[in-house]
Image (tube, grey):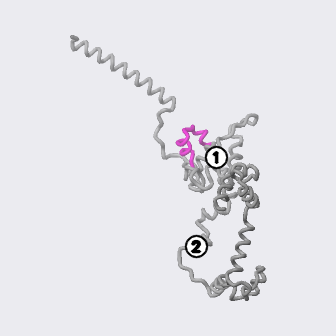
Amino acid sequence: MLTKEQLSIIDKEVSDKADAWLSRNLKLATQKGETQQPKSNRGPKPDMLGNPFYGYVGTTTDYGKYPEFAIDVIEGVARLDWYSKKERNIPLSVSKLCMILESQAVVSNQTIQDQFQFDKRHAQRYFKAIELALPRMMACRPQGLIDEMLGVFPEHTSEWDDLDSAYTPTPEELAKLHHDLRTFTEYGSEEFYNEVWGMAPADQYPNEGEPLRKALEASEKAREHPKKAVVLRLLSQGMAVARVARETGVHRNTVNAWKKAA
């Protein structure tokens, strides 16, 4: 068991070592900039830019993250000599510039620092690049984007807009519909149409429907397979279905169907 005096000595040693450790590490953290001093309201106000393209460009918009109308401007600004090394120019990131335009309604050095964890000087480069790009992007906007920014939207018209409501045809449309649905004999004699279709007068046949029947039979024969007659002749001579199919080149199923029908 330690006495009170010994415990007091040990406690003092531990406290001194802890204080020394805290003092040393807090000093290093301050030198590295890990702890930031509270911002002061004194001095000039930080520069800020209103971003007119916020909400109009980006991955969820019609123009995309890399808007085609402005990508040349953004790439040109990114390739400027931002590091004063003309022999070895290092461009800014086009992707980061587009991310700023997409995500920041108001652009400043501090918002860029917070978004990408840049140091102050590097954030100033990107701020200046946005400042140079914005007026040039405004000048090359397509008309559709100009109207959208101004809140001017053209009226949507469609030829199908009347499908959801009842539509009454005009007298001229009704007359055309009746004309298209007319029966032929109303506007021409039977002799006229018999002459057009090559049919004999109806009084030459005991059955009034005979001309139509013969015309249909002739039409049906004209549509028959050109080898059907040959196939039926070979089948009538007793030739097997498989051999008839090989000889004529007609499918076996078709030959069978013609044989059953005959």
Residue 130 in view (yes/no): yes
Question: Is 196 one of the magenta-colored residues?
Answer: no
The residue at the point 56 percent across, 80 percent down is 167
- The majority secondary structure of the magenta stretch comes to helix
239 vs 175, nearest the viewer: 239
Q: Secondary structure at mark 1?
A: helix
- Figure disc tally: 2
Where in the figure is residue 246, as x and y percent of width and height? 74, 49
Q: Is residue 135 visible?
A: no
The residue type indicated by label 1 comes to Lys
Note whether 42 is above or below 90 in the view shown.
below
Tell me if mark 2 has few (under 14), some (14-19) or many (20+) residues whose alpha carbon lies within 10 angstroms of its own: few
Q: Position of residue 26 (x, y in %)?
A: 44, 27
Q: Residue at x 60, y 65 (%)?
A: 150
Residue at (67%, 56%) from the top-left corner? 254
Relative depth, front residue between 225 and 20: 225
Residue linked to disc 2: 161
Where in the figure is residue 132, as x and y percent of width and height? 67, 50
User: Left of 117 or right of it: where is 125?
Assistant: right
Q: Amino acid at mark 2?
A: Asp
**Which quadrant: the C terminus?**
bottom right
Residue 16 percent coordinates (x, y): 35, 19
**Magenta-colored stretch includes residue 122:** yes
Q: Which residues are magenta?
A: 107-124
Q: Quadrant of residue 231?
A: bottom right
Residue on which the image places disc 1: 128
Left or right for 122, reference 72: left
Quadrant assignment for the N terminus: top left
